[in-house]
Image: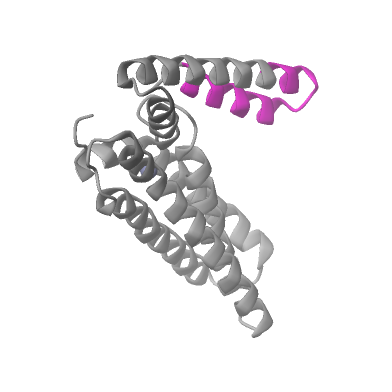
Amino acid sequence: MRHRSTFAQFADESGVLLIVAILVAGLAAVRLPAAHPGRSTGAYLIAGLITLAVFGLCAAAHELAHAIAPASGSASAELVAAAAGPLASLGLGGLCGVATAALALSGAGGLTVSVAAYIGLANLVLAAGTLLPGASSDGGRLLRAWIWRTTGDPRRATRGAARTGRAIGFALILGGVVVLVAGAAVAGIWLALTGWFVAAQL
Ligand SMILES: [Zn+2]
């Protein structure tokens, strides 16, 4: 397994990072004024920018966690390096959850509590998004490293991970169509698009 530079890792994950950043910006722009009406436009803007900036730092921590994990070229090292990023994001999501609760209990303003909650949510979405088993995603790398460690054959692991990713992708597309037909159009389309993303092994 070739050593992946931090930049290559970042390039692989830039799509997921961008999607989560757009979701966070949209959430801040729509939900902050709706949930906490009566504040100045500047207050919402600053709250939104702080949410995005801190999420950017959290995304950098995800990349850093991949980078500092030892990459010795073995299946076990690859397993650790692939898991490090999503684990960092899960940990940060949990920390934000604790911070949100602490802020709410200490009587902080509603806007501040919401910012902490959104940053936590964004980290959890980032962890889930990178764990989808695409070819260059953390989930795909984890699956490949796990099959590699089990079978001892890196080539077989690459094929096995791609096949499993495609199977999961098609299952998600099928699930999306079922949800769509059942009446939840937006959720169904999102699920099907996610499935297509995974099945195409991007
Ligand atoms: Zn990652």
Residue 115 seen anywhere in this rendered image of the structure = no
Q: Quadrant of ligand 1?
A: top left
**Any magenta on residue 198?**
yes
**Any magenta on residue 21?**
no
Residue drawn at (22%, 41%) of the image: 72
125 over 37 or under it: above or below: above
State the image quarter where residue 58 is shown: bottom left
178 over 194 or under it: above or below: above
State the image quarter where residue 162 is shown: top left
Return the x and y of residue 66 as percentages of the image width and height.
31, 48
Q: Is residue 72 left or right of residue 78?
A: left
Q: Nearer the viewer, residue 20 or 158?
A: 158
Q: Is residue 82 left or right of residue 170?
A: left
* Quarter of the image where the C terminus is located: top left
Residue extending farthest to the right is: 182
Return the x and y of residue 179 as percentages of the image width and height.
74, 23
Q: Nearer the viewer, residue 114 or 135?
A: 135
Q: How is the image coloured?
A: one colour
Residue drawn at (66%, 15%) of the image: 174
Q: Is residue 184 left or right of residue 126?
A: right
State the image quarter where residue 161 is shown: top left
Looking at the rendering, the stretch of residues picked out in magenta corresponds to 177-199
Residue drawn at (23%, 29%) of the image: 1
Residue 127 seen anywhere in this rendered image of the structure = yes
29 over 200 or under it: above or below: below
Q: Main secondary structure of the magenta part?
A: helix
Q: Is residue 18 left or right of residue 192?
A: left
- Total number of numbered discs in the rendering: 0
Q: Nearer the viewer, residue 49 or 3?
A: 3
Return the x and y of residue 152 as percentages of the image width and height.
35, 24
